Image (tube, rainbow, N blue to C red):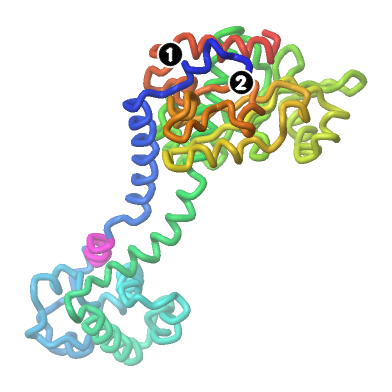
């Protein structure tokens, strides 16, 4: 493997590895926290301002509530649905919140409570019959001290899980793009002449900042860069980072979108790529935070050998510790048959540098910048 003088500089200390893992864990937990919300408080807020009369015996009868059941929680609007709330055009949000407390799917809600599931105005008699049944259902659900807001949390958790599954990889890919952007701009501030997708703003650097930026901007993904000298960088899912230009005889790239489109036409066919593109470097970006599974992640990264690609192949990864680089108890080092496929190994955490990694590891950052200079001919 090339790069021997700087290979060990790719290692993270235990403190750095923990910091990296914690930063990503906080992002995931924050997404989960926002997604799950505070169902109990939301139910109470939904009824706030409607001020139903909890002391009118006739309305309590229409709601299926005995006067002795009216306590502070009921008056706060967190235990039972009041008939006046259900009948009000302003009570739709509160009604839906109470239906969610039943634990029923949306289809079953509309089947068992069609009037409550419809939009106002509603028939008062049919509405009363359903409110009575709904409140009886909620009393049954709460049996044994069960909190029905857990149903809302459960449903939201299913959605949230899907959101967090690919979040770590997407944030790590943006971190790698930031490393390339900063290296290129440091070498030549005017080198980038066009881009496809959104460039991360200068204020967006840490995993949490990237997560917030992505949440606020559906297009927050940098897909390609076009350099002044005609070379292009594409950040893609199958090959996480490619640096290339058209082969002789092929038309120069008109813009970054053109480079991206031409790359996508051949992205999964190495032989086809070799007919139209000259690749200077092909890289894999791995944001692996499972310390027990690092070797497997590295093995999966090596899909094409450097010989097959006939170009530099780099790995940009974190967490990347000394055990992998030097060999731990099992002596499985970076010289195993899978990992010799990489000509260059970079630590994503060091090169991303949101928390000072470039300053802590200047030799490693310098090696990355030097490689970018050669690949991009800057």
At 41% from the left and 28% from the top, the residue drawn is 206
In this view, the residue in front, 34 or 323, is 323
Q: Nearer the viewer, mark 1 or mark 2?
A: 2
Res. 280 in view: yes
Q: Could you say where residue 286 lies in the image, as x and y percent from the top left?
A: 54, 35
Identify the disc placed on residue 283.
none
Locate residue 144 relative to residue 281 in the image: left or right: left
The mark found on residue 344 in the picture is 2
Quarter location, residue 355: top left
Q: Residue at x 35, y 91 (%)?
A: 126
Q: Is residue 33 magenta?
A: no
**Residue wearing tag 1:** 361
Disc 2 packing (10 Å; few <14; some 14–19; many ≥20): many
**Residue at the spot 57% in from the left edge and 32% down from the top edge:** 285
40 part of magenta stretch: yes
Where in the figure is residue 101, as x and y percent of width and height?
30, 73
Dominant secondary structure, magenta: helix
Q: x and y percent of residue 194 in the render?
A: 68, 22
- Residue drawn at x 72%, y 13% is 228
Spot occupied by residue 280 in the image (x, y as percentages of width and height): 73, 20
């Amino acid at each position: 493997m090339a790069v021997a003088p700087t290979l060990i500089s790719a290692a993270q200390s235990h403190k750095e590895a923990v910091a990296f893992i914690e930063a990503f864990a906080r992002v995931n937990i924050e997404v989960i926290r926002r997604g799950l919300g505070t169902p109990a408080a939301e139910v109470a807020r939904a009824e706030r301002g409607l001020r139903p009369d909890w002391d009118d015996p006739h309305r309590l009868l229409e709601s299926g509530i005995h006067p002795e059941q009216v306590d502070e929680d009921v008056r706060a609007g967190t235990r039972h649905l009041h008939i006046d709330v259900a009948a009000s055009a302003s009570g739709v949000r509160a009604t839906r919140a109470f239906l969610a407390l039943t634990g029923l799917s949306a289809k079953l809600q509309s089947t068992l409570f069609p009037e409550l599931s419809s939009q106002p105005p509603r028939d008062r008699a049919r509405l009363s019959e359903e409110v009575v049944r709904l409140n009886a259902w909620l009393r049954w659900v709460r049996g044994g001290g069960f909190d029905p807001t857990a149903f809302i949390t459960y449903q939201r958790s299913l959605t949230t899980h899907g959101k967090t599954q690919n979040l770590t990889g997407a944030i790590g890919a943006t971190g790698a793009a930031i490393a390339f952007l900063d290296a290129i701009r440091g070498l030549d501030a005017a080198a980038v002449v066009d881009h496809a997708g959104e460039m991360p703003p200068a204020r967006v650097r840490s995993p949490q900042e990237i997560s917030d930026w992505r949440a606020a901007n559906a297009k927050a993904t940098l897909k390609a860069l076009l350099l002044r000298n005609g070379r292009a960088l594409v950040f893609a899912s199958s090959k996480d980072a490619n640096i290339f230009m058209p082969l002789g005889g092929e038309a120069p790239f008109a813009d970054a979108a053109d480079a991206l489109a031409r790359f996508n036409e051949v992205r999964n066919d190495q032989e086809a790529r070799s007919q139209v593109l000259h690749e200077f470097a092909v890289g894999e970006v791995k944001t692996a935070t499972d310390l027990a599974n690092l070797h497997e992640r590295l093995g999966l990264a090596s899909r094409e050998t450097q010989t097959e690609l006939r170009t530099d192949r780099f790995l940009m990864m974190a967490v990347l510790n000394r055990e992998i680089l030097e060999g731990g108890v099992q002596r499985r080092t970076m010289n195993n048959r899978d990992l010799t496929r990489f000509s260059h190994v970079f630590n994503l955490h060091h090169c991303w540098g949101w928390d000072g990694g470039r300053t802590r590891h200047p030799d490693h950052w310098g090696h990355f910048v030097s490689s970018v200079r050669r690949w991009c001919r800057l």
